[in-house]
Amino acid sequence: MDKKLKIGIYGGSGYGGSELLRILLFHPNAEIAFVTANEQAGKPVSEVHKNLAGLTNLNFCSATEQVNQLSDLDCVFLALPHGQAMEVVPSLPSHVKAIDLSGDFRLRDQVIFEKHYKQPHTAMHFQSDFVYGLTETNREGIRNARLIANPGCFATATLLGLAPLVVNGLLTGRVIVDAKTGSSGSGAKAAANTHHPQRMDSFYAYKPFTHQHVPEIEQELYRVGDWTSELVFMTHSLPVSRGIFASIYAETKNELSESDVQKLFADYYGDSFFVRLVKGSPDINWVKTTNFCDLGFAIRGKQVVIFSALDNLVKGAAGQAVQNMNLMFGFEEKTGLMLVGTNP
Amino acid sequence: MDKKLKIGIYGGSGYGGSELLRILLFHPNAEIAFVTANEQAGKPVSEVHKNLAGLTNLNFCSATEQVNQLSDLDCVFLALPHGQAMEVVPSLPSHVKAIDLSGDFRLRDQVIFEKHYKQPHTAMHFQSDFVYGLTETNREGIRNARLIANPGCFATATLLGLAPLVVNGLLTGRVIVDAKTGSSGSGAKAAANTHHPQRMDSFYAYKPFTHQHVPEIEQELYRVGDWTSELVFMTHSLPVSRGIFASIYAETKNELSESDVQKLFADYYGDSFFVRLVKGSPDINWVKTTNFCDLGFAIRGKQVVIFSALDNLVKGAAGQAVQNMNLMFGFEEKTGLMLVGTNP
Amino acid sequence: MDKKLKIGIYGGSGYGGSELLRILLFHPNAEIAFVTANEQAGKPVSEVHKNLAGLTNLNFCSATEQVNQLSDLDCVFLALPHGQAMEVVPSLPSHVKAIDLSGDFRLRDQVIFEKHYKQPHTAMHFQSDFVYGLTETNREGIRNARLIANPGCFATATLLGLAPLVVNGLLTGRVIVDAKTGSSGSGAKAAANTHHPQRMDSFYAYKPFTHQHVPEIEQELYRVGDWTSELVFMTHSLPVSRGIFASIYAETKNELSESDVQKLFADYYGDSFFVRLVKGSPDINWVKTTNFCDLGFAIRGKQVVIFSALDNLVKGAAGQAVQNMNLMFGFEEKTGLMLVGTNP
Amino acid sequence: MDKKLKIGIYGGSGYGGSELLRILLFHPNAEIAFVTANEQAGKPVSEVHKNLAGLTNLNFCSATEQVNQLSDLDCVFLALPHGQAMEVVPSLPSHVKAIDLSGDFRLRDQVIFEKHYKQPHTAMHFQSDFVYGLTETNREGIRNARLIANPGCFATATLLGLAPLVVNGLLTGRVIVDAKTGSSGSGAKAAANTHHPQRMDSFYAYKPFTHQHVPEIEQELYRVGDWTSELVFMTHSLPVSRGIFASIYAETKNELSESDVQKLFADYYGDSFFVRLVKGSPDINWVKTTNFCDLGFAIRGKQVVIFSALDNLVKGAAGQAVQNMNLMFGFEEKTGLMLVGTNP
């Protein structure tokens, strides 16, 4: 019989938590011990996530209620707003593994963290124990990790598009990433920028040059290869619910043929079930609700553009988090993640 | 030269106010003296309604600033949340005409008002001076009115669909109105039910049987005809920004032919430029941003269904308000209201 | 080890076929022997349904290629345009079970069929062997059937809403169904009414009184209960991709309390996992991509309105078809159908 | 009294034609003599463009019917598919001015034309009489022109963003334009890529590096300034009906301050009513249905990104065409173009 991990989820009422629940409730090796949501404590999970009606009897609890249960757990997921995981992590028993979906432990440099997240870091001494959880570039590190900093959604889309080129040291000059996200990237709380009457007809840029995913992208590019380019990173808002699409403009040192680039990506992602290489452009429609990242590209002389599409809440958050859990506990990487997309 | 009315707008930061500004800034007989928005006082109108950038230098002001200016005005529009017009109306000089877009003065019966709006009415003695501003059923009344209670958006769609049948005493049995509204009907403030990630894929019913527009519909039907039917009224939320579509199911005392019904509507709306009769079903797409209400119908035996489509913010609010202003001041009814729709 | 049925799918390139593939490729008791799509014969399934890239190596074939393989099959699904299943069914070996997603074999009366589908019926003698596949009202019949006429999407939404009331003989007077469908209901081929620039802002009625699902609804209501009401059925187009929402207006012979109605539905659907009873109104957002039908209701005196929401391509087509297959072959009804919805 | 030009419109059933009609029917100096639509000849305009019901009694005619009327005209608009204007232009009387919305006469170089439009050019000797109709960069040329090649929608968005920088010779290195368009850019005919069930959740790139607007952009940049950069141009599809958003990434020779760039744009567009400079990013929501192009920018060191937003059918097509007509006939540039946007 399958071993069942005992899982705690912190921050279950947001969209990250929603997707963790959708996946983990049906994961053959997981059993959810508790799911916190302080404002909704006591309420059935299926009252907040009505998609789960008939599928679970779990209630939300408050984080403080669970303090005594922690030693029974195998793994916790932290799907909290930025700044809160750093309060939970120090209190975890040392045998409990943790996967943090927030930005709290992604950055090695405290100054850079505080500049981008605009808050002090109170648990920086834990950062060096955290492994950056981009599964496809860091599988071995993740397998052996106790603590995972799960990548940001934009960072995942960008890094998966760039890694094969950077690892092989093929780029020169600046790299421009024109990234677009669906409205669920803003979270589950209603706000002016996700007000439907306006958002449904909108497209605009935001946080020019300064998105907080920039430093984690650069940090990971330095780690995997010889990154010397300047990164120009621009985020935009799309009028869809789910999906990230990144158009990545780079220049190669030498001219590459289409089949060169094709082979490069095929080699790099040969063992990576969740990266699919497509002809021409991917489309967020084909990855929505799935853990896939679809990659395509086009070239002209030394100009190469890579197109990267994924679901911000799955491969960009909860799906990748579970993919990392699978690695950390020795399960097959795909376990519980055969989330099949739909047409249409 | 054209006479220019001096106009005050109360509540200019919401969607009703936004549409009043879009229309009145270009109305040949109007000059906006002030537009209030207490939370935005001092800010340029075009910072809030960015569609108006380059088109106006007006700033929002607070309502209290304008107290001394009131006697210079010809007309005020009240586009405030329910419950606030009743505070402004008593303070208006008696020569100033007023058009209230809220529900404050639509209902003759205080008990019914307080039941539906869940607040006490503090200026009920003004109610009898208010004329219900459904232009097409009440033109003469409006021409002579000083105070107008502008109809609700659902009420406008429903009444325009039913009036020709009720006026002619043709109905029997209960009437069922299945009404659907776009998200702008919830106003300009972000809220859970207009959160884009969810709303874009949603359709649901709300306030079953109890929408506050029910009593004003019934009150007006009693006024225009011999209304003895039971009204079953159901409101639903559509994932579009603008538009109301009402499917109105009724039964006629005798069988009518298609051409009978066609003639009935053509006669009743012969002088009504803003009601267009269409074959089959109208579509909210063809009326969006315009002051038109498109009506179609289908019959089978004694069953008749009328389809009514309009833009909730124009014919259902600001457009009809200006249409009423035109009548009250002796202008051609269409003045300033040639808001042409688009394809697509 | 699980028994694997050998399955043939006719008509795999449309949306019904797309959803059958999404479900059956991962059904533990199914193995797809072939999937036809005459215009796409020879092409990989994943080139047409790009959501399935990486998940299947199947190619489409033409129907004629498969004639000799038929005797190896256990079950075929017919997801063809109306009028084509009647050509395939007579050629099936008698041990092969079949589930037809089209309207070809739903209606007992040839005259009514030909009136609504506007074509002659060439295999009417098979009709009496077909069992109407609305799982929740007809489980025993389905278990013993060789041939299933899978219900229409509107019919499923309407019948699930009405059945508990009709079975118990509680209704009087006419019943009005105001039904709305997403654009995928029009199929996978582009057409004027699904042209995005216009459809995204549209809502309109179509086929007033005459939708071809009306006779199958009435036929099934006669079968399950003492149906004597007049049915007024109206279909509308919603600007979403997936989902049907039906607002069903009925009158009860006697006044029922909320808890009466609640109990009635709870009793009738006690064993039906895929019908969920919700407070107030359901929302198509919570059932999209799933096999659930969510039902809610409201009452006022003898007026009752039932709200029914489902995904037209799953519970309204492919999901229910597989649910029926499960029954016909003695599998647990839910097998392969734990398609979990998402928030958002 | 106002002079009324006699206008002929070729190609009135598409979206370009639709918008020309919306504008010219209400233009104080225009009178539409005829509007062609060969497939719809004889049909009322308002049956095809139902937004215009009640606003015009025009019928479509076929192009051949109008041959004898041409000498009465002052101006024709050609809103035909690419390749058809070159057949009409040679037959126009020499006193008739013409504005071509297609790509037929935009490119000076026949080889480049035939490469990008994949058809032979049969009237190339007329090309040198055509003036490129980007109003803001070419006002004087347009005033004196008889024949106008109205710019492509992507070209308009891109050129308005780049012109102030290129005219002043400030750029170095390659320029990357990441452009996105709404679905109406694909025209009024339904097609697979505008099929609503899929398009509403889609975002993808198309025609990488090779869009036919690239050569007209480069040609105009050479004309207005000292353009030596490489242009990397990428087009993407947005799930909205209307709007183009271009993110333009460039490098300046020297570092510029924010106020430098602000001043540069303010100076260049000081007399251009239809270009609005906004803080931060524009949003297609604020320009939809209007003739405005909203421009914003951000800088970091020598990196500058310009954001350009417009309505592809108005400033990107019909609106700019009328703007050009106004100049050509000596009317105020804004005449008939006060198309006010809406919030929401």
Image (cartoon, coloured by chain):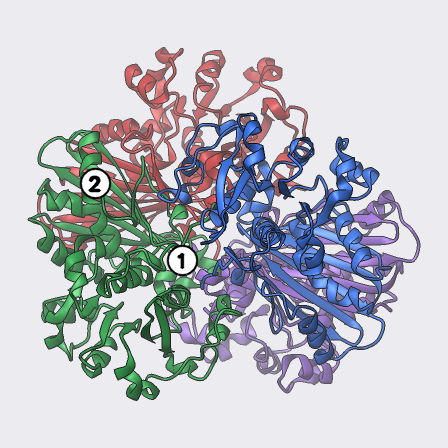
Chain colours: A blue, B red, C green, D purple
Q: Is residue D20 visible?
A: no
Q: Which mark is residue D50?
A: 1
D251 sits to left or right of B180: right
Cα distance, mark 2 to mark 1? 44 Å
Give the vertical position of C320 relative to C188 (above or below): above
Please, what is the three-letter code of the amino acid marked with disc 1? Answer: Lys
Q: Position of residue D269 (x, y in %)?
A: 78, 51
Q: Considering depth in this image, is A248 or B134 the residue closer to the camera?
A: A248
B149 sits to left or right of B42: left
Q: Considering depth in this image, is C97 or C313 the residue closer to the camera?
A: C97
| Residue beneath the point at 49% across and 69% down | C55
Q: Nearer the viewer, mark 2 or mark 1?
A: 2
Residue count near mark 2 (Cα–Cα under 10 Å), binned few <14, some 14–19, many ≥20: many
Q: Chain of mark 2?
A: C
Q: Position of residue D7 (x, y in %)?
A: 55, 66
Residue count near mark 1 (Cα–Cα under 10 Å), binned few <14, some 14–19, many ≥20: many
| Residue beneath the point at 42% across and 49% down | B287
When asked about the image quadrant of residue D242, the answer is bottom right
Q: Is residue B216 visible?
A: yes
Please, what is the three-letter code of the amino acid marked with disc 2? Answer: Phe
